[in-house]
Image (cartoon, rainbow, N blue to C red):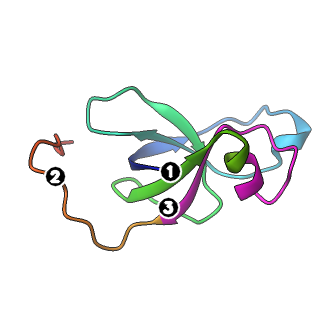
Amino acid sequence: MKIYKVDKTLVSTNRIAMMEHKPLLVVREKDGGTPQVAVDPVGCKPGDWVICCGSSAARDATGVKGYPSDLTIVGIIDKWEVPQDADTTS
C-alpha cells in the first residue's frame, strides 16, 4: 500500500460495463508527481490523503474480483504528519 493525495475527480462517462459507476479520482504520491487514476469506493474529496493498494489487491478492494483496476483507494487518512521533505503545495 502507498499514501497518495487526491488531486481531483476524473469524469469518464463512456466506460466498459464492468467498471459500473464507481468514482474515479486523480491521485499523486506527492504534489507535482505523476498523476494516476484510482477507483474510489470510500468517498474521498480533493485534498484528502489516502491509502491505496495496487495490483490484484486493488481489484479485490473494489468488491468485484474481475474489476479492471490496478489502483484502488482503501482508506482516508484522518491524521498524518507529512514528512518535511514532501512538497505539499497545491
Is residue 86 rendered to the left or right of residue 65?
left
Q: Could you tell me the amino acid type at mark 1?
A: Met
Q: Position of residue 69 (x, y in %)?
A: 71, 39
- For marks 2 and 1, give the CA distance: 17 Å
Residue bounds of the magenta highlight: 59-75
Residue 88 against residue 35 in the figure, above or below: below
Residue pictured at 78% horizontal, 31% vertical: 14
Q: Position of residue 2 (x, y in %)?
A: 44, 48
Q: Which circle, 2 or 3, is nearer the viewer?
A: 2
Tell me the element at label 1: loop
> Residue under circle 1?
1
Residue 48 against residue 37 in the figure, above or below: below
Q: Could you tell me the amino acid type at mark 3?
A: Cys
Q: Residue furthest left?
A: 84
Residue pictured at 45% horizontal, 66% vertical: 76
Q: Quadrant of residue 74?
A: bottom right
Callout 1 crowding tier (Cα within 10 Å): few <14, some 14–19, many ≥20: few
Q: Residue furthest bottom?
A: 78
Q: Earlier in the sequence, mark 2 or mark 3?
A: 3
Callout 3 crowding tier (Cα within 10 Å): few <14, some 14–19, many ≥20: some
Residue 69 sits inside the magenta stretch: yes
Q: Could you tell me the amino acid type at mark 2?
A: Pro
Q: Do the residues under discs 2 and 1 have CB atoms within 8 angstroms?
A: no
Tell me the element at label 3: loop
Foreground residue among 40 and 61:
61
Q: Position of residue 56 (x, y in %)?
A: 73, 43
> Residue under circle 2?
83
> Residue under circle 3?
44
Foreground residue among 6 and 67:
67
Residue pictured at 33% horizontal, 55% vertical: 47
Foreground residue among 83 and 20:
83
Q: Which circle, 1 or 3, is nearer the viewer?
A: 1
